[in-house]
């Protein structure tokens, strides 16, 4: 199977596939004498796993670990579950941080009259001062 076939089947671009190969995230494909890559079902599975893992928030290093677990017949599902629950905890922390940022921005917006005046409590607050000079 060539790279364009793999791209169609996995939903990835050829560029993304080459990137994942370059980073060593997938098993290196066989290269024919003409230099063309030849892919197998294993490559499709690894690349599909990568695409879907990226969609749910795993970073490249975490994806590398998941592909390694995928290729390890002696893996333990507990290891995969642990990594997944850690990602959930990371996402929940990020959501909490975003909600705090949102609240801070709303409070800043509430403090500003939003009129034609040059006085802007938002700018003053972000600049760390309390009055324009």
Image (spheres, helix red, strand yellow):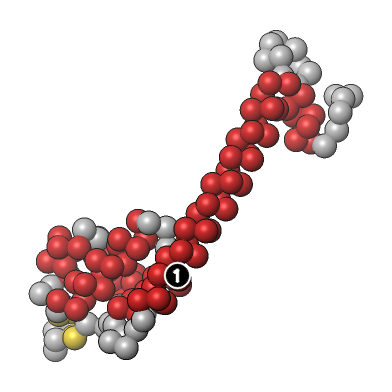
Question: What residue is at 20 percent from the left and 63 percent from the top?
Answer: 10
Secondary structure of the residue carrying tag 1 is helix
User: From the viewer's perspective, is residue 13 above or below residue 133?
Assistant: below
Front-lying residue, 120 or 73: 73
Q: Is residue 74 left or right of residue 82?
A: left
Quick one: quadrant of the C terminus?
top right
Read off the residue under disc 1: 83
User: From the viewer's perspective, is residue 43 above or below residue 5?
Assistant: below
Where is residue 22, by image quadrant? bottom left
Front-lying residue, 47 or 95: 95
Question: What residue is at 15 percent from the left and 60 percent from the top?
Answer: 8
- Which residue of the protein is positioned furthest toward the top in this rendering? 116
The image position of residue 28, as x and y in percent, is 27, 83
Question: What residue is at 13 percent from the left and 73 percent from the top?
Answer: 2
Q: Can you see residue 4?
A: no
Q: Is residue 105 left or right of residue 41?
A: right
The image position of residue 56, as x and y in percent, is 37, 56
Question: What residue is at 32 percent from the left and 88 percent from the top?
Answer: 74
Q: Can you see residue 92?
A: yes
Where is residue 76, by image quadrant? bottom left
């Amino acid at each position: 199977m060539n790279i364009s076939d793999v791209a169609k089947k996995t939903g990835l671009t050829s560029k993304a596939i080459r990137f994942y190969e370059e980073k060593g995230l997938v098993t290196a494909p066989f290269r024919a004498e003409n230099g063309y890559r030849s892919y197998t079902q294993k490559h499709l599975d690894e690349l599909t796993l990568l695409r879907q893992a990226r969609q749910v928030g795993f970073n490249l290093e975490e994806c590398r670990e998941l592909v390694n677990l995928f290729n390890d017949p002696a893996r333990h599902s507990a290891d995969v579950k642990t990594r997944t629950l850690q990602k959930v905890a990371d996402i929940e922390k990020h959501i909490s941080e975003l909600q705090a940022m949102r609240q801070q921005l709303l409070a800043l917006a509430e403090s500003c009259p939003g009129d034609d005046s040059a006085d802007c409590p938002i700018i003053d607050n972000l600049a760390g001062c309390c009055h324009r000079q």
